[in-house]
Amino acid sequence: MAIDAIGIVADPAANLPRNAIVSQEAFLKILLTQLQFQDPMKPMDNQEFLAQLAQFSSIEINRQQSEKIDSLLSIQATNQAIALVGKQVELRGAQAGTVGSVSAVSFSTGEARLTVTTPTATFVDVKLSDIALVR
């Protein structure tokens, strides 16, 4: 999940495909298949088996921590967006150099989108990453 933040330019290459993650079910299927087709004369070493289970547990814990960090980052982005209401901001991108006041925040897409009002125009659906400077 990509999180928007002020001054951060999103890197689409940083997102991993969903199928790159091995689920707990897939791991257990692999493990059962490994046990099923092992050589009866050379059974799987107990230490190796426990090491694989410990490795998977560690991966699962890391995945859960990553999800929690994503949630915290999302909350932080929401707080950042709400704190901008009434502040003067400078935009980047197509509206580079434009200075306006944040008049509203919406969350219809699940991410914070700002409405920036200038004396001549109103920009809707401005991402946090489109903010270059807060004045």
Image (spheres, helix red, strand yellow):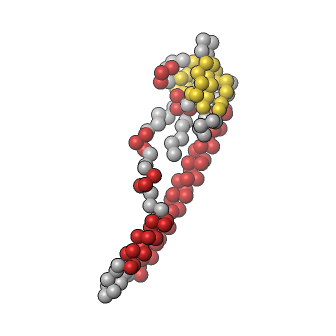
Q: Where is residue 72 shown, x and y percent of the image?
A: 60, 47
Above or below for 18 versus 79: below
Above or below for 110 versus 60: above
Q: Where is residue 28 shown, x and y percent of the image?
A: 46, 70
Q: Residue at x 45, y 52 (%)?
A: 18
The image quarter containing residue 108 is: top right
Which sits in the foreground, 94 or 38? 38
Q: Is residue 15 in view from this perspective? A: yes
Q: Is residue 86 left or right of residue 63?
A: right
Q: Where is residue 119 shown, x and y percent of the image?
A: 62, 12
Q: Residue at x 59, y 48 (%)?
A: 71
Above or below for 66 versus 50: above
Q: Is residue 46 left or right of residue 111?
A: left
Q: Where is residue 125 shown, x and y percent of the image?
A: 58, 28
Q: Residue at x 59, y 43 (%)?
A: 74
Count of numbered marks: 0
Q: Residue at x 51, y 63 (%)?
A: 60
Q: Residue furthest top?
A: 120
Q: Is residue 78 left or right of residue 40?
A: right
Q: Residue furthest bottom?
A: 41
Quadrant in which the C terminus is drawn: top right
Q: Is residue 58 in view from this perspective? A: no
The image quarter containing residue 131 is: top right
